Image: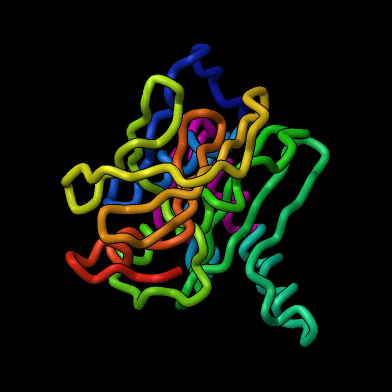
Amino acid sequence: MRVRPRRPRGAAPERDQRETAFTGILADLVRRIPGAHAAALVDRDGETVDYAGDDAPYETRIAAAHWRIALESVKEQAFLADVKSLVIRAHRASFIVHVLPQGYALLVRLVRGAGFRGWQRAVPACARRIGQEAGWPEAAGITWFDVDVSCDAEGRPCAVVCAGTAARVEVIGRHRRDPTQPEQAWRVRLVSGAEATFVCESRRFWYADEALTALTVSGRPKNI
């Protein structure tokens, strides 16, 4: 039996393929989901297009191929044909598999018992970024978009970056009031007059419920 050498604690695994434009997108997804160790973009044949994370590339590829096949088996059942995501808690790890256009899928591997917290916004936002890089048409039904937000001294959103420019936002309401919770949400008004909901997860990562490019049309407020 072949025994793979142990990797020094804290050392990144050696890649077995060149980085692509998807590598950084997948690495950002791993950072955003509590307990996530690796993420992979896999095609309809189970081949890994790219990956990121702390797991060995071989293990990531095997998991991506296995769960891509499992996803296809699920979707072959008529009453599950429209399934968008699978969430699996296994003996040694947990997995999230998300459907992408043109037969592709997104896999996230988490530590066992990670709790599946924080992926419902991070995964759709990642899928949108992958689609933009791949040149796919904007998928319908995407409800969350990752955004770059600046906060005031009290931790409330005060500005958002759109198209490389910071724009002021006005807080008009708060959805979460318990500061001990890892998720906080505010209703804000943008300079265009449009309104959106900003959510901060794990006190680090921000999401909006609308694409900012659709909200910041100069001089033409959009009602939501």
As drawn, the residue found furthest toward the bottom would be: 78
Relative depth, front residue between 57 and 213: 213
Furthest-top residue in view?
9
Q: In this view, does 165 lie above or below 55?
A: below
Q: Where is residue 209 in the image (x, y as percent from the top left)?
A: 48, 58
- In the rendered image, which quarter contains the C terminus? bottom left
Magenta segment boundaries in residue numbering: 47-66
Between residue 50 and residue 147, name the one nearer to us.
Answer: 147
Task: Decide which of 100, 119 is in the foreground and name it.
Answer: 119
Is residue 199 shown to the viewer in this render?
Answer: yes
Please give the name of the residue rendered at 40% of the width and 36% of the height, measured from the top-left corner: 157
Residue 59 forms part of the magenta stretch? yes
Q: Report x, y in % for residue 92.
A: 77, 35
Which x, y percent locates residue 100? 50, 69
Magenta stretch containing residue 159, yes or no?
no
Quarter that holds the N terminus: top right
Which residue lies most toward the right here? 91
Q: Which residue does the image show at 51% across and 64% down from the upper left? A: 143
Q: Residue at x 61, y 44 (%)?
A: 175
- State whether residue 118 is above or below residue 99: above
The foreground one among 8 and 222 is 222
Question: In this picture, is 37 found above or below 101?
Answer: above
Q: Which residue is drawn at 68% across and 48% down?
A: 95
Q: Is residue 201 left or right of residue 196?
A: right
